[in-house]
Image: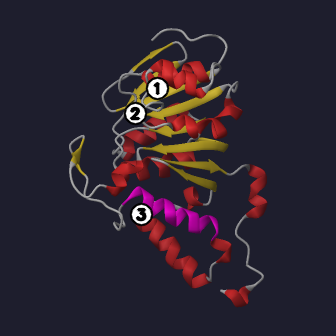
Amino acid sequence: MTDPSPFSVSFAAAAESSGSDKFNQHGYHRFYPHHLDRFRHREGNLVEIGVDEGKSLQLWRQYLPNAFLHGVDIGREGKGERFVIHRCDQGDPGQLRVVAEQIGAAFAIIDDGSHIPEHQLLTFDLFFEAVLEPGGLYIIEDIEVSYWRRGVLYGYPTRYGLHSSRTLMAAMKLVVDWVNREFLSDADRSVLSARLRDAGLSAATCDQVASLEFAQNCVLLRKRELWEEAFDCRPYKFSEYV
């Protein structure tokens, strides 16, 4: 891994020069700068789940010259200048908790790991609440597996599809409703809460979601800041509508 320039470059330039598939294959440079540019010169931790050949680590080292990078990967571990790679099975909650404690806190988390919806939801529920800082950004990549009805990925069967209730996308659509829960009747809110639990998402996590953005093959979520607690769910004054 070569040392980047001391001056950070644009996300698109860093992604292209690193050879990361975030540029040519996925086109994430269309979405990420809008959310990540505010962290350009931020000190602190960035986490990426799924390291593979390390191209994304090179991307982040160029784009975020003051950040410390935590990679999480099932098949690799190591460390170097401004980065460490934690060996961890994303499908194992115990291992995820250990890594979360080792990281401490991060201003951004990117899940480019197994792409399996159950793993994505498990990691999100743990890391969003325990690791992500208030106001931080959580990105879930490669959500296409939610739409696959057949096949195998990394040894895991992918029996999902548009109408499956077991997908990441189905759960994220429930989170959208939870962000707007103050407009629901008590009965509907109770049903929604139960459906979120069935999807593997805790109230501690869902209550902290300030906003979501759906884009091509990714979901971007912002964790609410402390001052936003004033906008916690309140009784809706137009109760006759619900």
Q: Which residues are magenta?
A: 167-180
Q: Label 1: state its secondary structure.
A: helix
The disc label shown at residue 212, or none:
none
Identify the residue shown where x is 72% and y is 86%: 239
Rendering coords of residue 202 (x, y %): 51, 60
- In the image, taking residue 2 as reference, residue 204 lies left or right, namely right
> Callout 3, which amino acid?
Ala
Circles 2 and 1, Cβ within 8 Å, touching? The answer is yes
User: Which of marks 3 and 1 precedes in the sequence?
Assistant: 1
> Callout 1, which amino acid?
Ser
Tag in front: 2 or 3: 2
Q: Is residue 153 above or below residue 170?
A: above
Q: Name the residue that disc number 3 marks.
A: 199
Identify the residue shown where x is 58% and y is 52%: 213
What secondary structure is the stretch in magenta mostly built from? helix
**Cα–Cα span, label 2 and label 3:** 23 Å
User: Which of marks 3 and 2 precedes in the sequence?
Assistant: 2
Q: Name the residue that disc number 1 marks.
A: 56
- In the image, taking residue 53 as reference, residue 208 lies left or right, namely right
> Callout 2, which amino acid?
Gly
Q: Residues within 10 Å of mark 3 (few under 14, many from 20)?
A: many
- In the image, taking residue 194 as reference, residue 29 lies left or right, namely right
Q: Is residue 171 magenta?
A: yes
Rendering coords of residue 31 (x, y %): 58, 41
Residue 178 figure quarter: bottom right
Q: Is residue 67 magenta?
A: no
Q: Label 3: state its secondary structure.
A: loop
The disc label shown at residue 50, or none:
2
**Cα–Cα span, label 1 and label 3:** 29 Å
